[in-house]
Amino acid sequence: MKQFPYVFFLGIGGIGMSALARWFRANGHQVSGYDKTETPLTQALASEGIAIHYADVVENIPAEIRTHRAQTLVVLTPAIPADSREWAWLRAENYDIRKRSQVLGVLTHGHYTIAVAGTHGKTTTSSMVAHLLHHAGHDVGAFLGGIAVNLGSNLLLPGAPDAPIVVEADEYDRSFLTLHPDVAIVTSTDADHLDIYGDQAALIDSFRQFVGQIKPGGTLLINHIADPSVAAAAPAGTRIIRYGLNAAQGPELFAANISAEGHQFHFNLHSLQGVISNLELAVPGYHNVENMLAAAAVAQLQGVKEEELRAAVAAYRGVKRRFEFVVTTPEHVYLDDYAHHPREIEAFLRSVRALYPGKRLRVIFQPHLFTRTRDFAAGFSKSLSIADEVFLLDIYPAREQPLPGITSEILLADITAPTKAICTKAEILSAAQTDNSFDILATVGAGDIDTLVPQLKLLLTERWK
């Protein structure tokens, strides 16, 4: 990529895009970009010296980009709408335009690559792998799909040019097929992104293709409840390790004696290398214990010793908006989570129940995408019904146009929680100033519900002190 001193990002505020932007800037490229909305992440990029504009106007593209076509790489996110003016102009001017996934494939080429795929858990698991190796003193780089709390970033720069790279392998738009990993983790193969794939069979086929690209002599760690045809697609000679929480179903890698104590989960790690007892995970959740199983096994494969692993697991602090404790008092807790699929919501809420049995749980959920809401409506209603109170925001459209008849109302009807309603953000904030009828509050979703978090934090901190 040295042939491109200038790099321009269309959709620079995306979590994966911003990691690439930071990588290019750290490696001496002049980086700029467009996004439709200013966010804390774009503000952080701007503070790091990256020029960003927010109006889709060709004249806003920096002069050096418009006058150095042959020396400019344009990186594109699939979230950019087809009618983007800037994208149309760059295409008409024959710029070298590549998808984020294509660029990630080029940057990881020649590196020992640890790729984490799955319809749930890949951001947390990839951040765990990067953290465990980094904490143990191994030279490692990482491109992450979230802000790792320990790193304070979604990018970990390697020290040496040939250091291993940890990447989140995104199945959306078949992006992960640009990767050829030495080690692959598949956390789940549940149906998702049916707007892209059409049905789950096509999604499974894409995972099979990804696993089929593992390098000779490589390793696959796969959740034991994933579709069995995925592991079967691994190249001959691939070491296959199945993992999961249910030892009775036969995974080689599993957790035992899981217990919740305070905000921590304790468990014993059982692997082919033996048993490591009483690991302490400060990021709660049964799903996070499962994610840590895969990450710990990768760390062991990379030579991390037992005591190094024990210390690294205890030091892990998670990813922003993944089971994040926003406000905690003796009587009340406010949590925030990115869950946007029924399985993720169920895992999160069941773990909250395990931590706080008998407490009254209020959930504010923002559905993400009209197609996902349509395709998994029954699952959303069932998983949200774990709560005592459910308040729904309108669907966050992201890249989609509205679909007739698809609104948050279709979820509300089948939610069995005793209290349920559809609310605006203003109504949520108004209630937070006066209503104290709950013990645990959780904001959940992948849209712009995170804009409520700092406001709720301020209000609740003042009320609960």
Image: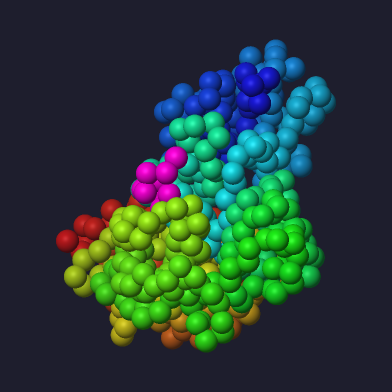
Q: Is residue 280 above or below residue 456?
A: below
In percent of width and height, residue 393 lies at 52, 64
User: Does the magenta segment cover residue 134?
Assistant: yes
Q: Tell whether position 27 is magenta.
A: no
In front: 47, or 459? 47
Residue span colored magenta: 131-139
Quadrant in the rendering for residue 120: bottom right
Q: Is residue 376 left or right of residue 265?
A: right
Q: Is residue 95 left or right of residue 218?
A: right
> Which color scheme does this rendered protein use?
rainbow
Residue 89 x %, y % = 77, 26
Q: Is residue 82 above or below residue 352?
A: above
The count of marks equals: 0
- Residue 270 in percent (x, y) is at 44, 74
Which of the pair 191/161 is nearer the observer? 161
- Residue 456, can we see it? no
- The residue under the point 22% across, 62% down is 463
Q: Residue furthest left?
A: 465
Q: Is residue 179 visible?
A: yes
Query: Quarter holding the C terminus?
Result: bottom left
Residue pictured at 46% horizontal, 24% vertical: 49
Residue 164 drawn above or below residue 432: above
Q: Quadrant of residue 312?
A: bottom left
Q: Residue at x 76, y 27 (%)?
A: 96
The x, y position of residue 423, in whole percent, is: 48, 67
Work out whether residue 220 or residue 363 is closer to the camera in this orientation and state it: 220
Quarter the N terminus occupies: top right
Q: Residue sitting at 80 percent across and 29 percent down?
A: 91
